[in-house]
Amino acid sequence: MVPGLELFANDLEKRQSNFATLLAQLHEAVNARRWHEVVEIAEQVLAAAPAHGEARKARAQAWKSVQPITVAFHGPTPDEEPEPTNNDPPARFLLWIDGVGGYLVCLGARVSLGQATPDARADVPLVADVSRMHATLTRDNEGYLLESVRPVLVNGGSVTRALLRPNDRITLGASCQMMFRQPVPVSTSARLDLVSGHRLPLGVDGVVLMAETLILSGGTQSHVTVPDLQKPVVLYRHKDGLGVRHAGTLSINGQPMAEKGYLGVNALVAGDEISFALEPVGTRMGPN
């Protein structure tokens, strides 16, 4: 065998062996309900195979069980960033969908992108070699305007300002790439997906820039796809906060709702086809 090819074959065999070992460890941790360990191992599996369905499902189950500490998304400590005192929606919240994954949802019309450091204040903190405040996205009547503070490429071309179009590829710094998507034509909400192997601190699966609605469905026209969901679930904004609409059966924090209901700053929503939790960024819900 050619020496270079032999090295490649040996490396591939080693990677496959390590991957198989990780999967075995993941199964063992899930069966033993060691949820913190499940999160760590699932992250390693997804780093090698981002679309691995079993690892995604295990990670979502683990997050739901341990109710993670979410202060990693924001520089200040929980004492410095108090919880909302009423039902007004926070500027950002975490959406954990059972069996699907987690999403950072940003409600602000202006969202900053930057490096995830303890003292940084970026709305979308990235575990990547980017500046602490690298760029901003502003939503207005024209669409989403990207403005750069540090080097940014859109579809390979250097920009300082750019009006984004669906499926534009944004590169921050040398290699942190994300895809800008607007999968629901009737909604101005958008989604950012990391496509370069980088991640956010909690390893969420994407970022949703929520305008008026956030649609969960089993079809392609959804901000978050939930397989086998027959009737869409719609999160929407109203004057008092956030609401949810669904033609099926849902309960909010254990209370049945009829077609629509209102969501507080923390909410657990469950139904026959879907269950999910909302959690404001900056609160401490897990163990110290």
Image: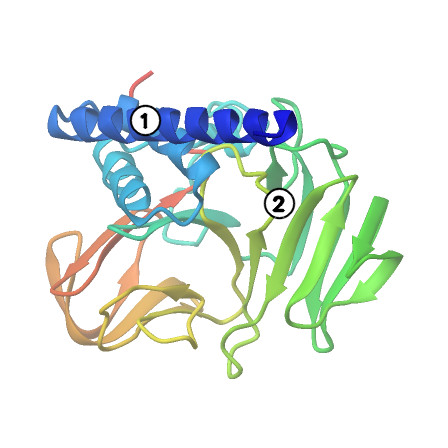
Locate residue 60, reporting x and y percent: 29, 42
Residue tagged by mark 1?
22
Q: Nearer the viewer, mark 1 or mark 2?
A: 1
Q: Quadrant of the N terminus?
A: top right
Looking at the image, do the residues carrying marks 1 and 2 touch, with CB atoms under 8 Å apart?
no
How many marks on residues?
2
Locate residue 42, reporting x and y percent: 34, 33
Locate residue 225, reporting x and y percent: 36, 65
Q: Residue at x 77, y 59 (%)?
A: 146
Amino acid type for the residue under numbered disc 1: Leu
Q: Nearer the viewer, residue 228 or 85?
A: 228
Q: Is residue 285 above or below residue 275?
A: above
Question: Residue lying farthest top?
Answer: 288
Q: Residues within 10 Å of mark 2 (few under 14, many from 20)?
A: few
Residue tagged by mark 2?
196
Amino acid type for the residue under numbered disc 2: Ser
Q: Quadrant of residue 256?
A: bottom left
